[in-house]
Image (cartoon, rainbow, N blue to C red):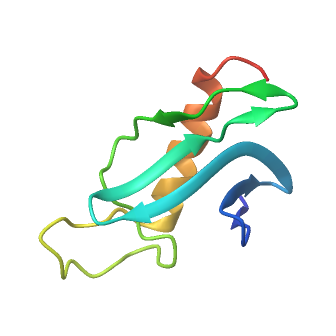
């Protein structure tokens, strides 16, 4: 398993661009498909099993009101999302 988050927020798994991006907000972690003209796609946020993920730790310490799932859980959930999305 290999997860990378590029500096432009692109999610890369096993060296492959997933065409998904991630951002952290005060409300939680948002995984989304960015709007693009080639190939054509509309901006779309994707529902994830956890509200918040730590993208830096596998076992984050629960020090917030909304506990975060870890990095490996994020990777697992993104892989599951990719299996559900239609092919690009």
The residue depicted at 75 percent of the width and 43 percent of the height is 18
Vertical relation: 9 (above or below) 62: above
Q: Position of residue 16 (x, y in %)?
A: 85, 49
The answer to whether residue 39 is left or right of residue 71 is right
Q: Position of residue 72 (x, y in %)?
A: 52, 62
Quadrant of the image containing the C terminus: top right
Q: Position of residue 77 (x, y in %)?
A: 50, 44
The residue depicted at 75 percent of the width and 53 percent of the height is 13
The residue depicted at 27 percent of the width and 58 percent of the height is 27
The answer to whether residue 63 is left or right of residue 33 is left
Point out the residue furthest to the top here.
86
The answer to whether residue 8 is left or right of residue 14 is left
Vertical relation: 85 (above or below) 77: above
**Which of the 4 image quadrants contains residue 80?**
top right
**Which of the 4 image quadrants contains residue 85?**
top right
Q: Position of residue 71 (x, y in %)?
A: 50, 66
**Number of dots carrying numbers:** 0
Point out the residue furthest to the front here.
37
**Which of the 4 image quadrants contains residue 20?**
top right
């Amino acid at each position: 398993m290999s997860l990378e988050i590029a500096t432009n927020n692109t999610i890369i798994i096993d060296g492959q661009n997933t065409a998904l991006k991630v951002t952290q907000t005060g409300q939680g972690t948002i995984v989304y498909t960015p709007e693009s003209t080639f190939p054509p796609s509309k901006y779309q946020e994707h529902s994830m099993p956890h509200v918040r993920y730590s993208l830096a730790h596998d076992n984050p310490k629960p020090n917030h009101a909304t506990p975060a799932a870890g990095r490996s859980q994020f990777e697992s959930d993104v892989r599951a999302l990719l299996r559900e999305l239609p092919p690009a």
